[in-house]
Image: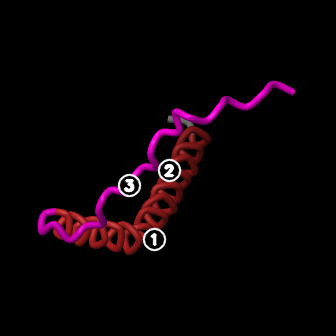
Amino acid sequence: MNSAIIIVFIIALAGVVSASFTYAKKLADQVPELLESFTKARAAWEDFKKGEGSPRPELPPPADDEEPPAAA
């Protein structure tokens, strides 16, 4: 094998390893936020199952007796 090919292979392998570490660190940085979101979602689900969730908001009654707005 030509020595240039070996050198290019080593440089390419170092680049792949470096990119892998970078993406692994970014993923690891998101884990605490993911766990916090999971905890909030689980607590909301438990409240929903217990019936302690906020009730559905009441809609205002339909305004049948009002006239539609006039075109400008």
Q: Which residues are magenta?
A: 49-72
For the residues labelled 3 and 1, the Cα–Cα distance comes to 41 Å
| Residues at circles 3 and 1 in contact by the CB criterion of under 8 Å | no
Q: Residues within 10 Å of mark 1 (few under 14, many from 20)?
A: few
| Residues at circles 1 and 2 in contact by the CB criterion of under 8 Å | no
The residue pinned by badge 2 equals 16
For the residues labelled 3 and 2, the Cα–Cα distance comes to 56 Å
Q: Residue at x 12, y 69 (%)?
A: 50
Circle 2 — which element? helix
- Image x and y of residue 29, in percent: 45, 71
Q: Quadrant of the C terminus?
A: top right
- Image x and y of residue 64, in percent: 52, 33
- Image x and y of residue 7, in percent: 58, 47
The residue pinned by badge 1 equals 29
Q: Residue at x 29, y 62 (%)?
A: 55
- Which of the 4 image quadrants contains residue 57? bottom left
- Magenta stretch secondary structure, dominant: loop
Lower sequence index among marks 3 and 1? 1
The residue pinned by badge 3 equals 58
Amino acid type shown at disc 1: Asp
Discs 1/2, front: 1
Residue 58 vertical placement versus 4 (above, below):
below
Q: Residue at x 25, y 67 (%)?
A: 53
